[in-house]
Amino acid sequence: MDLFDMKMPDQLIVWGNPLINGAWISIILVTLGIVFVLTKYKKWRWLWDEWLTTVDHKKIGIMYIVSALLMLFRGGVDALLMRIQLALPNLEFLDAQHYNEIFTTHGTVMIIFMAMPFLIGLMNVAVPLQIGARDVAFPTLNAISFWLFFAGALLFNLSFVIGGSPDAGWTNYVPLAGEELTPGIGINYYLWGLQISGIGTLATGINFLVTILKMRAPGMTLMRMPMFTWSTLITSVIIVFAFPVLTVALALLTFDRLLGAHFFTIDGGGMPMMWANLFWIWGHPEVYIVILPAFGIFSEVISTFARKRLFGYSAMVVSIVAISALSFLVWVHHFFTMGNGPWINSVFSITTMAIAIPTGVKVFNWLFTMYKGRIEFTTPMLWSLAFIPNFIIGGVTGVMLASAPADYQYHNSYFLISHFHYVLIGGTVFGCLAGLYYWWPKMFGFKINERISKWAFWVFVIGFNMTFIPMYLVGLKGMPRRIYTYREGLGWTGLNFIETVGTFVMGAGFVLLVWAIIYSIRHAKRDYESDPWNGRTLEWAIASPPPHYNFARVPRITGQDPLWRAKKKGETIFEEKTPLKPIHMPNHTGIPAVMAGFWFVAGFGFVFEWIPVGLAGILGVLLCMMWRSLTDYHDHHEVPVTELRDAAAEEIKNAGGRSARGVVNDG
Amino acid sequence: MSQQKQASAKHHVAGYAFSLVLTFVALFVALYTSLPASVKLIGIVVLAILQMVVQLIYFMHVTEGSKIYQLLSLGYGIFVAIVVVAGSIWIMLYNTMTQ
Amino acid sequence: MAELDQKVNLPDFPEYQTEDGRLKIFGFWVFLAAEVVLFSTLFATYLVFKDQTAGGPTAKDLFEVKEFMAETLILLTSSFTCGLATLKMRLGQKKGVLMWMGLTLLLGLGFMVMEIGEFIKYVGEGATIGTSAFLSAFYVLLSTHGVHVSLGILWVSLLLIQVVKRGLTPITSRKLFIAGLYWHFLDVVWIFVFTAVYLTGLVS
Ligand code: HEM
Ligand SMILES: [Cu+2]
């Protein structure tokens, strides 16, 4: 059977283009460097014990965030390359094919491998702490989620040096992405990279849903949960119900390409539009998956640094719950122009406009939270303040696009590009950074240097607006998206040039940010302050970094913002008198990483359509699962009371005993 | 968790009997009656939904454990399922339906 | 094994005894809710494509009442026997669990044999996954269900080994209960295959 002959693609190792050669060389050098350092300082054991086999949600969170920052770098380099090519008319820095590959990987990396993992990383770090839990519901599954994301990201990122990148856009529209018009393996990388990491994301959704619903500390009712926890809960719901659609859509296209099925082909009765339909049934909920957690972060940060309770808490909850349902009812707005019936476009225009309402409600709540607050302009607060106007620009232009007849004008122009960058950068990326700054001291016991960070902030925000305001204008002047060059004399040149300069300014902002982090790692004072921001929620009641079991005593919650209440009243949320009990904690395990390794092998095999390799990988995955099923009877150990005493004492001290600094009376 | 007494074997036999009856009624309605096609389709879909309810109650014990949360998740899944099925059919076949 | 026939003293609902058990059972319900969406997407695809036969064989040409009725009855019966196994598990009767679960496995295998036989027959009649959109959707929907059943067979077999070795403990009971949920769920999916694919295919 020809399925079993292992064909070699035309170009297995991509070589020749100077950019790619450079990438190759740097990949090899970096890998060698890492291996050298690990060996020289005898860190392999440490890497395996402390990180690769960990099931601790805080460490998993940190691994997510580090990977996401790397992906932000990779996606950012893609962006710079595109902007160089478009700076002036008729440049030949990239050819058409290379340009297509770069905008495809840019979009995919940023959404799937940067935004989502960054947010999931922050959820991992903060959510169990915020609800007073000692871990997530399924710690091993949590590790599996991370490693599947990692395997998927690795696979996808290999494409440009081994075999060639996908080039049909992050939306991967057929028939272009079909076997007929795009043979070769680039598209397969897209399909398998997303498939593998998507399974991990689904597992994360289930895990956090169960954790939040079932593992809250006594007294932490749903309506007392911090807003970040609420937004994580709703995000998990959306993940659980949206990701299966992506799984199917990817699988169907895989069958078209691998087995000659006819789902999305033009002949054989297939319908290319069905891909758009399925993709966006997942895709629109996906944009809410990457914005809701950011909303949650802004809520925490704004209320902390305005020193006020979040205004309109219940309205916020109602809004996000409404968004979770509405987000499944608007997907057609992404293909208004594909010739749907008038009824269809009208209905989906209306639902799309409706979703702006709960979003607007939230903006007002943030503004009222700050009203008459005593605002402290820390870096996380700056990112949150900048979010509001920038996100409004993105949201308002979204409503403009929501009108189907108007969308015929804007669709596939730079106007659209600017819309989603205003919401994705102004919302998601600003949120990720605010969260990173906010929880950094909790993760590591010291703050990131504020002075450099404020520079980074201003440079980045100015660069961002310099890039994307002109994009709205050039879009209105008719410049379509996804073109690799343009003629002179269309009135686009000046604006494009400003955009490119702006992108470099943003890049400088990113460099400053990295510099701030490195500088702080080397020089910042390790004060291990448990409550550095004068916070309101439970995570600030325990040590920084927290012990692996988080809470020596489970806290007792009597209202919203429990720590704040305790500090105000000079009480404690930990019952000093209850005797300490040994704590049950999950054991480390290597199965998640090994299993993800097999997924990687499977993905690699199927990308190259080497069926035996793919099947061998799947077999490995199955064996790991069977092994786990047979051996999970003793996967916990006990932390003895003697180990808990110090932590317990510190908890008591933090949570109110040492009376709060600068508490204002606002309830 | 509700601590009601557990279901008996009789209970299971009843569930099994229901499911057999529903299956044969569906077969009969679909193939051996002369109702209009649309009525038949509605009929068999309703019967399938009843089957699902039988399985959920008699065999899957959906009312035990975290009852409310379980029912909510399932309900949400069914909501999205209906949106996906009805929406896709409407969107993809609209142009053929109106001809 | 000496303890094979022992009636172990377990509480009424052994699967819910530990915190871990409760979390896992609820987690599995959430997973099943996600599976509802997964299968609904496949059903949506099938229903969109069911008349796109591209000149190839149609539903009426292929489906045979006797065949799919037999498959349906086998699966319904297996759901029943699986339910009885859960009942025995709650009564702490290990032997009963092994017997009814074993029977469930056999029925599951029988179903798979029939389904594979059906596919081979269709392919012989010139109906492959590449023939038309209708057949692509048909094969993918049914094999997704079939792969689930096969994985279920593998999983339950593995569990039975654990039950033989360890007896009915809160952990093995929880595992059995969850595998049971999975099995019943696949039966529900099949009901919809029966309705939306086979019956609908022969109606109009
Ligand atoms: C105020 C609420 C929003 C409305 C009314 C809205 C509306 C729209 C519409 C109508 C389109 C399609 C335009 C076209 O293709 O011609 C669109 C595209 C897009 N939106 Fe939004 N949007 C909103 C918020 C968001 C948010 C919060 C995000 C993400 C964080 C987002 C991300 C995107 C993306 C990524 C695309 C384009 C995808 C592509 O074609 O590559 N939007 N939006
Ligand atoms: Cu959208």
Image (cartoon, coloured by chain):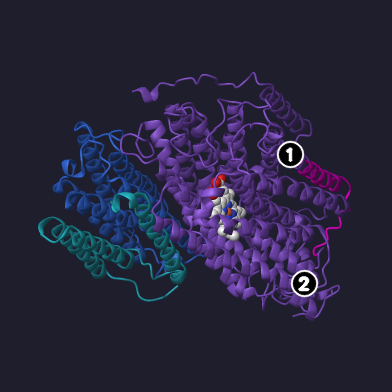
Chain colours: A purple, B cyan, C blue
A343 horizontally vs A269: left or right: right
Give me the residue at 38% from left, 67% from top.
B62
Q: Nearer the viewer, mark 2 or mark 1?
A: 1
- Of the numbered discs in the image, which one, if any, rests on residue A478? none
Q: Tell me the residue that label 2 is attached to.
A: A655
Q: Nearer the viewer, residue B97 or A493?
A: A493
For label 1, being within 8 Å of ligand 1 is answered no
Residue A552 position within the rendered picture, expressed as x and y whole percent measured from the top left: 70, 65
Give me the residue at 82% from left, 78% from top.
A664
Residue B71: image quadrant is bottom left
Q: Main secondary structure of the magenta part?
A: helix
Q: Nearer the viewer, residue A448 or A410?
A: A410
Residues drawn in magenta? A505-531
Count of picture labels: 2
Question: Circle 2 marks a residue in which chain?
Answer: A
Give me the residue at 20% from left, 44% from top.
C59
- Of the numbered discs in the image, which one, if any, rests on residue A494? 1
Indicate whether residue A511 is drawn in magenta. yes
What is the three-letter code of the residue carrying label 2? Ala
Residue A521 position within the rendered picture, expressed as x and y whole percent measured from the top left: 83, 47
Residue C186 position within the rendered picture, expressed as x and y whole percent measured from the top left: 33, 53
Marks 2, 1 in one chain: yes
Q: Is residue A590 above or below residue A386?
A: above
What is the three-letter code of the residue carrying label 1? Gly
Q: Secondary structure at mark 2?
A: helix
Q: In 3D space, how far apart are the residues under numbered discs 2 and 1 (Cα atoms)?
A: 57 Å
